[in-house]
Image (tube, rainbow, N blue to C red):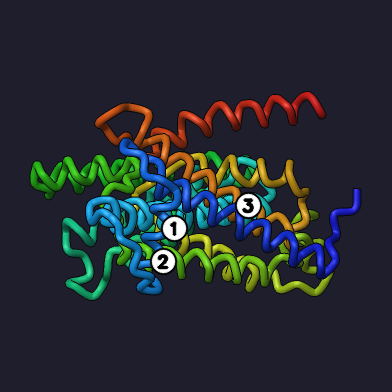
Amino acid sequence: MNRTLTSGGRTGAAFAALVILLLALWMGAAIGETAIPMATVAQTVANRLWNAGYPLEPIDEGIIWSYRLSRAVVAASCGAALALSGAVLQSLLRNPLADPYILGISAGASTGAVGVAILGIGAGVLTLPLGAFVGAITAFVLVSMLAVKAGRGTAAIILAGVAGSQLFNALTSFIVTKAATAEQARGIMFWLLGNLSGVRWADAWLAVPAALVGLVVCLWHARPLDAFTFGAESAASLGISVRRTYLALVGVSAMMTAVMVSIVGSIGFVGLVIPHAARLLVGVRHGVLLPAAALTGAVFMILADILSRTIIPGQVLPIGVITALIGAPAFALILAKGRARA
């Protein structure tokens, strides 16, 4: 099947993707423990952006704009960024199990963020996202070094990632136990499960640019990623700078993961499952796969957030619990189908 799109087809696909994303954001703002009509959501956005002057209940307008819509935007950015990171890492490492969570990048980012927040590492120079980025890069470097020492092929990076995750999770727990107050410990442990409850528009102004920059950088390297399908040696034979590509893509993956972890905590299975789902939908060419993964991840996270707010009346579950409950069976199904085809 030829999956190459004409310019008109690409325009139509981009328009359809935008419509799907806007509809998901619309649903995220309307659906909750208290349902709000979709028309009220549209009127609220019109009032806030263009001073349309629709007469609305202040409570409904506040819930939509200050709570639900900002939360949906951050959820979409987080889902897109984690899905992109997973797709890139799986292609670079040629391992279907690679993702920021399993490779320890999320755990390292958590340790870096907690170190800045509780220990004051950086003496005010390091912000929470920058501390998370330093932790993410440190984790990936250590995991890579351990995998090289192990020298057991692509499986070694996964085993090293598991070890790295345990190490950095232990460091995070040690920091929290040793230095955090009881209130800080409760907040951080809930945050580490993935928490969107506290996000506001200030967080969206950080999350959206990080996801967009990551998408642009990844799309710029779409053709090199296609070449990496056949291995680094094949990519080098085609004139691709392997070292530069690795540095750029690992760097942007760590950046996206660090920013999202600093905002919402560590969320698993999105970077692992969503790229596989996107491949089933659009194939393996990265020019199409990357935007498809970003869109699928964004919509998935919005729907997961809606579920986290509505599944138990009067209580909000950590979104990481929802992604694990959905992602683990989905990944098992993908593995079973892949084995059946083999």
Residue corresponding to mark 3? 293
Point 67% across, 62% down: residue: 15
Q: Nearer the viewer, mark 3 or mark 2?
A: 2
Point 66% across, 41% down: residue: 277
Q: Which mark is residue 333?
A: none
Label 3 and label 2: CA atoms lie apart by 30 Å
Taking 334 as reference, is 165 left or right? left
Taking 272 as reference, is 220 left or right? right
Tell me the amino acid under the disc marked 1: Ala
Q: Nearer the viewer, mark 1 or mark 3?
A: 1
Q: Which mark is residue 46?
A: 2
Q: Which mark is residue 42?
A: 1
Point 50% across, 47% down: residue: 103
Tell me the amino acid under the disc marked 2: Ala
| Residue 316: quadrant of the picture | top left
Q: Are marks 2 and 1 in contact (CB under 8 Å)?
A: yes
Residue placed most toward the observer, 19 or 43? 43
